[in-house]
Each structure stands twice: as C-alpha cells, then as structure tokens.
C-alpha cells in the first residue's frame, strides 16, 4: 500500500497529473495479453531517467513493488503488478533520441513504439529487424524486457542480437549505462544481454541503443498450401536443414486458416491442412534463386499449390493473414493463451504432430501458428478462464506441450518470456543449480525484491 | 600456495600425470600474448566436468585462485595466473561432442581449437563465423572467455552472437547449464552472454553449444591501394555508412605493409600509405554486384589501384598478408602490445589520423591494423618491456589512444578483452555506478574471488 506520505512524495516527483490512482487508470493497467489480472496502487508516468531514479529510490525505501510497462502487449503476464505497488508506464517517454545510419544505431526512450521506429528508419532506407507481431503498438522497452522475437528473426535474430547499449535504473535508484553505441564492444561484462529478457525483474530500462540494418533491396513472398500438416512441417525442416535462411517461414494450420478467412476474407485455401508463408529478402538475383530452391523443396515435400505475391499489395495481404491470426483467434472466446514452446527445427514435424494430438486429447480449442523456421511453436488456445473444468483441460494440455518440447531438446519460450505463465514449468528445462544461480543474480541486484516481484524469479 | 595435503587431494582427482608443478610446465603457463608474466603453483589438465567441479570446490575451500586457460593466445593478459594457484588447462578437454547441421548447432569441449571445428564443419558445408586471427590455434573456450571477434565478424557478429548454451562450473563447484541448443530461447535470464567475455572471472566453462551457419556459395576478395591513409579510412566509413556489409574490411598502414613484405614477399605495394583488404560473400550474383559497388566507392575515395584475387590461391595469399601481420610485427622487438580501441565507423578517419599522430608524438614504433569496417583499431606496438623509458612512452601513447577513442564515442576493446592490459582505463568509458554494478555481480557469484583474480574486476 502507498501511504499518504509516500503519495505526496511521489507527486512531488512527477506532479499530480502524472500520478494516477483513479480506478479507471488502475484497471487499464491491471492486465496485459495474458489471462491474469492484478491492480497496482498507482500508475506513474515518468518523463525522464531522473524521475525514474527518484521513484525507484522511494519505492525501495518503502518496500513498494515496481512494475515497468510499455503498451502491455506481452503474452506471459510480464506486466501484471502482482504485488500491487507502482506501475511505471513509459507511454510518455517515447522519444526517438537519435538515428545514426552511418554508424548503424538508433537511440530511443523505452516508450517508443517499434512500428514508429521502423517508420523513422525507413526514411533513411534502414530498419530494425525484431518484428514481434505486436510491432505496430508494442514498445521497444517492452521488446527489450521480453527479448521479443518475430517472424523475420529467423534470418535476423531477436532483440538481444540488436541491443548495443542500455541505461538502467537499478533497484537502488542508481543509474548505470551498459554497452555502448559500438557494434563491437567487449569492455567489461556483457550486461545488455543480462537485462534483455529479464522481464523487469532487475531494473528499469530508461534508454536503449539498438543496431539498425540497411533494408534489403528485394523481397519475394510465397504461400505454400498442403493437404496435410506433416508435409507442411517437413518442408520447414528440409529447407532450414539444407542451410537456406529465409527471412521468415510461418506455419498456420487449418483452424487458423479458417478463422482468419471467416474474419478477413483473404481467399485463403479453407480446405488446406497447413500453409507456409515464406519471405526471402536480400539482393534481387539472390532472392530469385533462393526462393526457387525453396519452392522446389516445398513441392518435393507435397505442397499442392504455391502462390506468389506479385506485388507489395499482395504481399501485404498474405502477411495480413498471418498478422491478424492472433487477434482473430483471441476474439473467439473470453480468453486466449498463446504458448511459445520452441524445438530444434529438425523436430518441427514431431512437435507439430504432438501438439495437435495433445490438444485433441484434452478437447482444447486451439489453432496452431508457428515461426516454424526456428522451431518456435505458437498454439493459440482459446477458452473461458471462468470455466474451471475447461481451464483444467487447458492446463493439462499446456503442461504436456511443454513436456514434449523439453523431451525433444526444446525450451519453454522462444520469444514471449516466462513471466507468470510458465514459471512453474522452468524445472522441465532448467536444473536446480541453474535456477538457484538465477536467484543469486536477482538477489544481488534486487535484494528487497521490489522489481516486478512474483514473476519467474523469486 | 598449494599445501602438500591439497596437492595430494588434487592428484586424487586428476592423477599424478595430469597434475604438474615442474618448473617447465609452470613457466610454459606463465605468459600469454600480452607482456605480463606470473607463475601458478600447479597446472592441472582435467578431462571432465566432474573433475573440474571437484578441483574448483577444493580450490574454493582452500582460497586458491583458479585461472582457466585454452591455448593462451589472448592479447590482454586474461590467462596470466596473477595470484598463483591453479591454472586449469583445457588442452585435454578438446572433443567435438556433436555437430548437428540440420539443427544448426555444434557442441564442443572448451579445448577444441577454433580451426579444428571449422575443418569439421566444412565437411558438411557449414562454418562457425567467429574467426580471431589466432583461429588456427586458439580454443573455443578461450574465444568464449574473451568474446573473440575477427575479420568476418563485420558481417557475421562476434562469439556472443553464436553462443547458444554453456555448461559452467561455478566458484562453488556447482555445475549449471545455461541457454540450450535452440536458436530462439528466452527461458530465464540470458546467462550465456554473461559468461561470454567474462574472462574466466565468474566460473569455468566446461561445454559450449554454438550456432553454425551454411557456407556462402561465393566469395570475392580485393585489395585496394591508397596514396594516403585518409582516403583509405574514408572508403571504410563511406562503404559501411551506405549500408553495404562486406564479410570483412581490413586496413593496414605502410608500416605493416612493409614489414609483412620484408617477411613474406607477397608483392604488396611498398609505396602505399594504406591498403584495404575486402571480402564479400554470399550468393554469386549478389557478391558480384556488391563488390562492384565497393570498388566504385574505393576508386571514388582515391584508391590508386584495386587488385582482385582471381582464385582461391590468390585469395589465400592476400589473406596471408593480413594474418601474418601480427606475427611479423611481434618479431620486431622483444615485446608486442596490440591495442584494440573501437569507434563508431564514421569516426574511423579521425581515429586513424589521431592514432598515427599520437604514435609519432611519443616516438612509439607501431603498425596500424584495423578491422576497419566495424571501427575496431589494432595499433600493434613493438617495444622492449625492459626499457623503462620506452615503456613510459608506450604507456603514454596507449592512454592517449584510449582517451581519443572514448572522446569519439568509442570503447576500449572490440574483441581482445580488458584483462590486465586495460583495467586501469575502464573509467574512461564506464561510470562509477556501472563499475560498482559489475563488482556486485562478481561478488555475488564469486564471493571469495578465486576465479581469475586481479583482472578487470576486483
């Protein structure tokens, strides 16, 4: 609980208009894209690192929890203020500080929306590769907190791979700057990566320097259609195993295809059991040849049809199908849980088959999406969280999916994080010593556990 | 000091033939490629993680320092057993555990030589991108400890970018496994990166899983020759700033060119003030076009000659010039110190000019090499460490080079690490809070400071 004295002190830092404890604001910040809800005592909207530092110092002195928050799009409950306290919203720290394409970096405040950075970079012919499906509204700060991925991370890598430097307010209120703007830098411990994907449990990120990349000259996009899911999955492991690296290789099963088609009328093949959406980018002639090889492999693995986008409009339409899938599915029931188990790509056929069997066994409603090229599976489960019996089946299925992933040498999360959603499953992929080691790190940095408490770490 | 009792216990773990404290072995493990020397009390050659764990436990209980060591090629004093104790040599833990190209990973013991992994991968048409110049004899364990780079890291990234998983023996003797074999994995803190570049100060790495990549279809290599160093440097910032990403872009100045030519008679242009060695790789037609654009830019920036390697033999010869440079220079004097300051690429012309001016001002003998494409400068200073007056000039010049790098937004090290060589300069690029934070991490993991003590961290 925030005392009246503390409230006054906090208002002293941000002013009354950026300290909110009205019920509308509290409720608006009590949920994210996962199913759990919890109310903070106050939501603060800082404008500067200095304000953040003062807020965190005060919170520490008063044992008040801090939950940093971007736009709350994460799927693992990472932004739920489970222990109340303060939600720190970065919606007003949303400036692009610098774009420097000659030196291939950009500096942003954490509240900058990924899509806005993309737009700004596009004017210079550059882009920032990590592209979570939420990119039009998720923030770079949130992307860093969750180490977000996305379709084109298959070729380009995830958020951590583009992080050059961070400014962080530690739980003590002290400000540190880790990394730099240099693409190559081995000066001291590699601490940018420690904070990336730490889900707000180690400190509050207040400035981010990312590496940016020149836009590829050419893109080619196809949709390959299959009569069965096995052929779809085998195409994936065959293409990737041969050393080809498409920019993206997305799989959708029949459930997804039909719900998207119901909603968006894009002309998707409703009878198909599986489709692959594949992008190749780079220099024009290289793209031509690479995609020709992929099409050959798709056909050899049983694709009954390969459609190619003839222009940017058609490409956008194909991608719209993929991008809208999560939203469409999430409207089918009161709640939607997107799982994120990831396996080595050779195991994709086994994993896809296994996921379907598990979902059917427990009569769980779900469509299967996947960033298939990097083995990153997204069964999107729809259910009503108020229906206890249904939720028990969902939980049983989820547990079995994670067990299957672990047994195939996979892991719990490729890009969504652990948060609340998967903390209980950590022992499936991490032994006791390693979990204890993570706790050692957390305790050393945040001994009072004020940073986003109750998530995957103590 | 290792007591007789402890010696017996250690021999109990590894056997008498893998516990060495004869003076020859001690001296052979008292130096690396930096200038400082220090003697361990014993050198142990473990064969397994279990042996390492037992050794580290005993060392911890007896307050004995542990310095892990691969082949001792590092340039920053990272493997010097400054506080005596035990050197843990990984020369007998040198097995390639698994190569799995369909899933794009390889698992190795730390003592595997980088070049040996390359050879094994080449048979499957794959490679492991990080290529420090020492790759024919440096180990993957050492590469991870230092977060090694290399010429083609310009396009492909450094060691940390290829690290999927690690097995680590903590200072307590406990064994943890961080990361996995999945290319995408955000399960818990990103701890592989914390150990990468930690220079053996946090634990002993006993197994390494790296990401591997399909070999490019085609490579094109040119040597661009310049009448002045300014034009050479401007070509670099122009090419990179335009968004082109060569596989490698290496700069050598007149001093380097002439010493290499004296030694190897490769027909290098002795009159040139600067040369650039540039590789482009990828799909054949893309390589053609990209290199054509680079040649155009090289000429526009004043290249007086552009030679192209016509075949693999000629390519090898050009690269031999670059690869032999460090060895050739190091034979010119009793000691050789390779600096490693790195700047944003737009600052390469200013930095090169500044380095030359500083070296001349202090009458320091040095050739300038650079992984220029990523701003990673390597002034190779030759001197006699016994000549105090000369060493004072070397130190003054080195300090000024780091100050210049810092003033240009650069950093102390791009790929060689901090170790002994640069610890004193950390405050140039890192504030007090950030250094204190690194110390917090170190103390939490290694409270007795047994892991490679006396390096960049307390």
Image (cartoon, coloured by chain):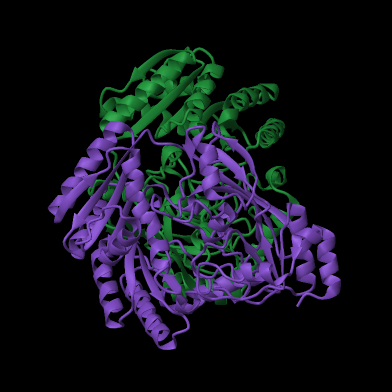
Chain colours: A green, B purple
Residue A75 sits in quarter? top right
Q: Is residue A43 visible?
A: no
Most distant residue in the bottom direction: B389
State left or right for residue B196 relative to residue B40: left
Q: Position of residue B298 (x, y in %)?
A: 18, 51
Considering the image in quadrants, where does the N terminus of chain B appear? bottom right
Please, is residue B148 above or below residue B3 in the view? Answer: above
Look at the image and tell me in which quarter the C terminus of chain B lies: bottom right
Q: Position of residue A43 (x, y in %)?
A: 50, 61
Q: State the residue at coordinates (72%, 46%).
A: A427
Pick the front one: B119 or A400: B119
| Nearer the observer, B303 or A290 | B303
- Number of numbered tags placed on the structure image: 0
Q: Residue at x 52, y 50 (%)?
A: A146
Can you say whether B207 is above or below B445 in the image?
above
Q: What residue is rendered at 20% in x and 41% in y?
A: B292
Instruction: Judge left or right: residue B240 versus residue A35.
Output: left
Closer-to-camera residue (A98/A407): A407
Residue A388 percent location from the top left of the image: 70, 35
Can you say whether A191 is above or below B40 in the image? above
Residue at 63% across, 44% down: A421
Q: Position of residue B363 (x, y in %)?
A: 30, 81
Could you tell me if residue A352 is visible in this image? yes
Quadrant in the rendering for residue B141: bottom right
């Amino acid at each position: 609980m925030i005392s009246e004295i503390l409230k006054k002190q906090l208002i002293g830092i941000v002013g009354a208009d950026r300290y909110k404890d009205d019920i509308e604001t509290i409720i608006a910040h009590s949920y994210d894209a996962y199913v759990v809800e919890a109310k903070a005592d106050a939501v603060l909207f800082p404008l500067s690192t200095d304000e953040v530092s003062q807020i965190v110092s005060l919170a520490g002195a008063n044992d008040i929890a801090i939950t940093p928050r971007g736009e709350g799009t994460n799927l693992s409950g990472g932004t739920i203020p489970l222990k109340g306290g303060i939600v720190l919203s970065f919606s007003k720290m949303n400036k692009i500080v610098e774009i420097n394409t000659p030196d291939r970096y950009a500096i942003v405040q954490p509240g900058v929306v990924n899509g806005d950075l993309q737009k700004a970079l596009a004017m210079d012919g550059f882009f920032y590769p990590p592209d979570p499906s939420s990119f039009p509204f998720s923030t770079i700060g949130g992307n860093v907190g969750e180490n977000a991925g996305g379709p084109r991370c298959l070729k380009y890598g995830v958020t951590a791979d583009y992080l050059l430097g961070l400014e962080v307010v530690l739980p003590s209120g002290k400000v540190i700057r880790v990394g730099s703007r240099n693409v190559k830098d081995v000066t001291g411990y590699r601490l940018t990566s420690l904070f990336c994907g730490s889900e707000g449990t180690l400190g509050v990120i207040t400035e981010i320097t990312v590496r940016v990349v020149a836009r590829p000259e050419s893109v080619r996009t196809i949709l390959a259609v299959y009569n069965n899911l096995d052929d779809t999955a085998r195409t994936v492991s065959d293409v990737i195993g041969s050393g080809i690296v498409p920019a993206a290789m997305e799989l959708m099963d029949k459930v997804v295809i039909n719900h998207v088609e119901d909603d968006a009328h894009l002309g998707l093949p409703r009878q198909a059991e599986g489709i692959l959406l594949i992008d190749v980018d780079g220099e024009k002639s290289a793209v031509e040849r690479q995609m020709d090889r992929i099409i050959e492999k798709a056909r050899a693995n049983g694709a009954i049809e390969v459609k190619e986008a003839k222009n940017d409009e058609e490409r956008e339409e194909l991608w719209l199908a993929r991008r809208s899938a999560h939203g469409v599915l999430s409207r089918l029931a009161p709640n939607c849980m997107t799982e994120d188990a990831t396996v080595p790509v050779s195991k994709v056929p086994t994993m896809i088959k296994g996921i379907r069997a598990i979902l059917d066994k427990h009569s769980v409603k779900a469509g299967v999406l996947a960033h298939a090229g990097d083995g990153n599976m997204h069964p999107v489960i729809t259910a009503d969280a108020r229906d206890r019996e249904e939720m028990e089946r969902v939980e049983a299925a989820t547990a079995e999916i994670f067990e299957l992933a672990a047994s195939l040498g996979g892991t719990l999360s490729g890009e969504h994080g652990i948060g609340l959603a998967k903390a209980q499953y950590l022992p499936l992929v991490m032994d006791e010593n390693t979990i204890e080691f993570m706790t050692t790190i957390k305790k050393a940095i945040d001994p009072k556990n004020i940073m986003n408490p109750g998530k995957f770490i103590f």
